Image (tube, rainbow, N blue to C red):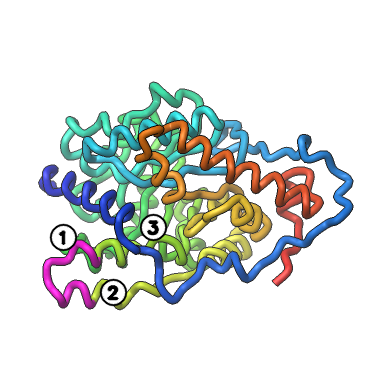
Amino acid sequence: MPDSTATEGRKVDHIRIVLGEDVAAKGVATGFAAYRLPHTALPELDLDEIDIRTTFLGKPVNAPLLISSMTGGAHVAEKINLALAEAAEQLGIAMGVGSQRAAVVDSRLASTYQVRRVAPRIPLLANLGAVQLNYSFGVDHCRRAVEMIEADALILHLNPLQEAVQPEGNVNFKGLLAKIEQVCRELPVPVVVKEVGNGISAHDARRLYEVGVRVIDVAGAGGTSWSEVEKFRQNNQQGVRVAGAFADWGIATTEAIRQVRAALPDVTLVGSGGVRSGVDVAKAIALGADMVGTAKPALIPAVDERGTEAVVEGLQAFIKELRVAMFCSGCADLATLRQLRLES
């Protein structure tokens, strides 16, 4: 098992770097700017009646929004996760926590993820790195992560590039598909597989679906780059150079959404990766996403002194932008938006 103190230190590093450094992907865009929603001057709709409600993991949500997995495993993260969860509860949207590896190893850190007391009704997603299934973790650890936070599903995240450039990265990804299949078969809640910012291709999505994964979060390229984050954690120039060489690596978010939806019409698809507005949310849904995730736009207000209030205000803007985008493109509900043909 990894040293929990080292893991906690890494989590603190990640928060500090994401908030304080330029870690956006370089040379690759999400693709949202390449698409336009068609403007309708006579929508024949009442903006107040636009319906953005849906369901996710069997629970109703007021908007197709997921606060994507960000943090936990460090005491400084507890306040952040509580602010995010309180905002999600107030808005009636979903939330995922950051990797729970640290708390599975050291139960004293469990409280940094435990947000059910402030968010009893939302769809809540537990989270572990899939690669940990090759480093002594098994189904029991996955079950422990779910029970720790009373989660509705477990995210197994895929981050080969981040692990490859991380100073203490776990890089043995051999045989993971069979282990993911075992978790899907034995865990009592659905398994979600997501990338962390480099995208999932149609080929990989098909392989995951074939072994029982029914929710895929593409987490495409164009937003925060975790190779760029790890570049700031290097202790030598070679490490900086290697990590920096991959700033433009990955599948653009919009392309990943299109690829996976075309390959898997029935999968529950989360579109995330550089989503920065409600207009992006609308475009992601029109391209094939069922839910849309965003991370950094929620993290920044979460560390504001106003905490929950600031997160709510920021995400309310996302929701209003989504509603206005639907209104001005003639879409009364999400089903209509999913049928909309975007201009490019």
Return the mark for residue 311: none
Q: CA distance from mark 1 to mark 3?
A: 17 Å
Residue 264 falls within the magenta-colored stretch? no
Residues under numbered marks 1 and 3 in contact, where contact means CB atoms less than 8 Å apart? no
Image position, residue 150 (x, y; %)? 38, 28
Image position, residue 126 (x, y; %)? 37, 39
Which residue corresponds to the image point at 86% horizontal and 56% vertical from the top-left? 41
Q: Earlier in the sequence, mark 2 or mark 1?
A: 1
Residue 236 falls within the magenta-colored stretch? yes
Of marks 2 and 1, the one in the foreground: 2
Image position, residue 260 (x, y; %)? 56, 62
Query: Within 10 angstroms of label 2, few (less than 14), some, or many (20 or more) residues?
Result: some
> Label 1 belongs to which residue?
168
Q: Earlier in the sequence, mark 3 or mark 2?
A: 3
Q: Give SS at disc 3.
A: loop
Return the mark for residue 244: 2
Locate residue 340 relative to residue 235 in the image: left or right. Answer: right
The amino acid sitting under disc 2 is Gly
Task: Tell me the quadrant of the picture where the C terminus can be found.
Answer: bottom right
Q: Earlier in the sequence, mark 1 or mark 3?
A: 1
Query: Within 10 angstroms of label 1, few (less than 14), some, or many (20 or more) residues?
Result: few
Q: Is residue 237 above or below residue 261?
A: below
Q: Is residue 209 visible?
A: no
Q: Give SS at disc 2.
A: helix
Q: Is residue 83 above or below residue 282?
A: above
> Label 3 belongs to which residue?
196
Magenta-colored span? 231-241
